[in-house]
Image: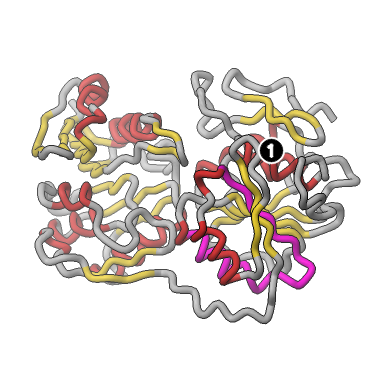
Amino acid sequence: MNHLASTTTAAATPFPTPWGALGLTRYPEDPRERLRAWDAADEYLLRHLAGEADSAEGRAAALAGRAVTVLGDRWGALTTALATAPAEHAPARITQISDSHLAQRATAANLARAGADPAAARLLTTRDTPPERTDVLLVRVPKSLALLEDQLHRLAPALHPDTVVLGTGMTTEIHTSTLQLFERILGPTRTSLAVRKARLILCTPDRSLDPGPNPWPHRYALPGDIGPVSGRTVVNHAGTFCADRLDIGTRFLLAHLPVAAPGARIVDLGCGNGVVGTAAALAAPGAELVFVDESHQAVASAEATFRANLGPDAPAEFLTADALADAGVPSGSVDLVLNNPPFHSHQATTDATAWRMFTGARRALRPGGELWVVGNRHLGYHVKLRRLFGNCRTVAGNPKFVVLKAVKR
């Protein structure tokens, strides 16, 4: 099979696998994208599985006919490579587990581009029930140690003494605390030598271990000086941004939160644990809330936080989507969008996500509707908002953050 399909776009970069090159892209596809959909850690893991890596550990596992679970595959590089492997290497079943809506959209697109059987891989979220049995567990180490802890707890019952557990990441992503989690929850753990700044984690399951209960989700009471949500309960599933405290950007936005008209339709865009949208709902009884995030863990957190404070019958939607691009929110249907945009994609700094959030917000807003944004002052979001909306006003600022308002004309 020629893995580098003819449909490869300008944004696709060839990913060298032991079985041929794959043309992979991130999601959403952008011909101007400079960031790859794979890195040296993905390449190292596959070479190790195929027995090609320069590693004293040798071949990790025979894949053919085995049930493989791939956790945290960032853009589908590992899943696509395994799904298109020759028959003598092909797993009997591939299950990908991801917290990221974008990663799973990328995986689906990359599988199709590579000509893989649509049924070759089952795509699950971190909120779904994991497989009952896993023979090979491949872990792309996430940025969030909490998410790794939660998912290892959830996956541990599916492992058996012969399960091969193999993690991978760049050397800057694998810390002593990472290895301690594997060892405490799954079993004895060691690492490989670094190759091109990537490293492998090799773990031997020990079913006699008792790691204790899964500590997630985490609940805490908010501080008492932040407006409508003062002292309220917040619920955080593992991996949600600032899971154990209120981040300072959100605190600054809450101090300057607009009060919507009764019955307004409000979007908490990039909702995280839903504190901002919950505050808006408490300040405007009868408002209809829409919580949107690309993280399944975040959307689950937002729903739990909102329901804990407004009850089961308060009107709200909880959507996992790419900004508002594929959320199904009709154009011109929203009165207010509240947004604290991220400026990182894994280890890379980028404004692409913020730009998609702003453009999606403009489409969803009614004429006269408002987008309120909090961001680090140095990011210069006011320039983008003026370009897109034709206007932007600074509502508040301090040495680190600004709150900006743009109105759809």
Q: Is residue 342 above or below residue 35?
A: below
Image: 99 above or below 104: below
Q: Quadrant of residue 391?
A: top left
User: Closer to the camera, 196 or 222?
Assistant: 196
Circle 1 residues within 10 Å: few <14, some 14–19, many ≥20: many
- What residue span does the magenta drawing correspond to? 147-170
Residue situated in front as seen by the camera: 76 or 349 = 349
Q: Residue placed at 73% from the left, 64% from the top?
A: 134
Task: Please say which color scheme the image uses.
Answer: secondary structure
Residue at 51% across, 41% down: 102
Give the x, y percent position of residue 61. 81, 55
Residue 157 in the magenta stretch? The answer is: yes
Horizontal placement of 115 versus 35: left or right?
right
Residue 297 to residue 402: above or below: below
Residue 143, position in %: x, y? Answer: 47, 50
87 and 360: which one is in front? 87
The residue beneath circle 1 is 43
Q: Is residue 362 visible?
A: yes
